[in-house]
Amino acid sequence: MQASTDIRTSRANRYFWRSRTSRLATGVLTYAVMAVVLIWTLFPFYCAFVLSIKYSGDFWTSKYIPFLQFRPTLTHWIQEWQELGSPAGLGRGIANSLIVASASTGLSLLLGLLTAYGLRIRRGGRFPTWLLLCFFLLPRFVPPLTIVIPFTMMMRWLGLVDSRIAVICAHTTLALPLVLLFVYSSMTEIPDAYMDSARIDGCEELTLLFRIVVPMLVPVLLVAGVLAFAGSWSEFFFALLNTQQRAWTAPLAIASLLTKDGIQFEYVGSHLLLVILPPTLLVLISFRSLARALTFGTVKG
């Protein structure tokens, strides 16, 4: 009897240590992968920061640790601040990008919300809802390079070249399908009973949309707006072909550092960090809403 008990105890101890070793190995592997991904993601930003505090003579050296491998300086940041408001500075590009990204995001959310609600309450019709949804998503099915030339020609015919309106229209066209897909997929999770009860009480469709549906979709709308804003902020080709100087955006301001005399490395690091800052802050602010949006639909009618 004692031998049988000892055998069971020995087996339990071996199972415990194997399980503990397996959990430890899994945890170490998980943290190692996370560390590699984190370094892979942050290394370009760190390189930009290091480049912004280097002296000009250290640009071509493989020195990445301040104070140990090289002596840092704030000269380039001082020059960046002094040139921020000049025609060749980054100020105009950031201002135009803020205006264009905010306007295109607002239009995308409004049009996407109205279109998604129309598809949600649609009854019958000649075309099925999925076919209409595919039609609305068509701008995302084709590469943007295939439509940038026709769009630019249309803006020239309308006399909107080198204007913020042209860039806003382009970025709204690119962001609207993503917003529509995001909002519609979340709107279909709202139980019909909520909407039918509001209609029985005499609620009109627009009132129902903005007073009942929209408050339930706030996390989804916030995340869709952040994605639309980030996409507009970093878009390059449409802005390049539809602007010349007045509607110059932040990505074009960075590209302008490549001149006939070479790359202006003294502004590369500071330009990159300043341009990266706004969308990064938006993502950090909306992080909790992103988690809520991804779990939307857990409430069932």
Image (cartoon, rainbow, N blue to C red):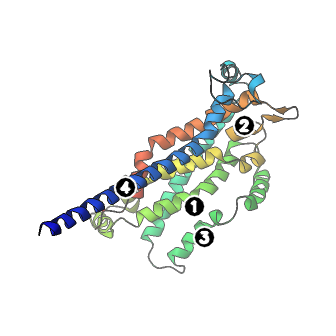
- Which element is circle 2 on? helix
Vertical placement of 247 versus 298: above or below? above
Looking at the picture, how far across and down is residue 202, in whole percent?
30, 63
| Residue that mark 4 sits on | 21
Sequence-wise first label, 4 or 3: 4
Query: How many numbered callouts?
Result: 4
Q: CA distance from mark 3 to mark 2?
A: 35 Å
Which residue is drawn at the image coordinates 79% and 55% (left, top)? 153
- Foreground mark, 4 or 3? 4
Q: CA distance from mark 1 to mark 4?
A: 48 Å
Q: Amino acid at mark 3?
A: Phe
- Foreground mark, 1 or 4? 4
| Residue that mark 2 sits on | 254
Q: Quadrant of the C terminus?
A: bottom left
Looking at the picture, how far across and down is residue 154, in whole percent?
76, 56
Q: Amino acid at mark 4?
A: Thr
Q: Mark 2 packing: few (<14 Cα in 10 Å), some, or many (20+)?
A: many
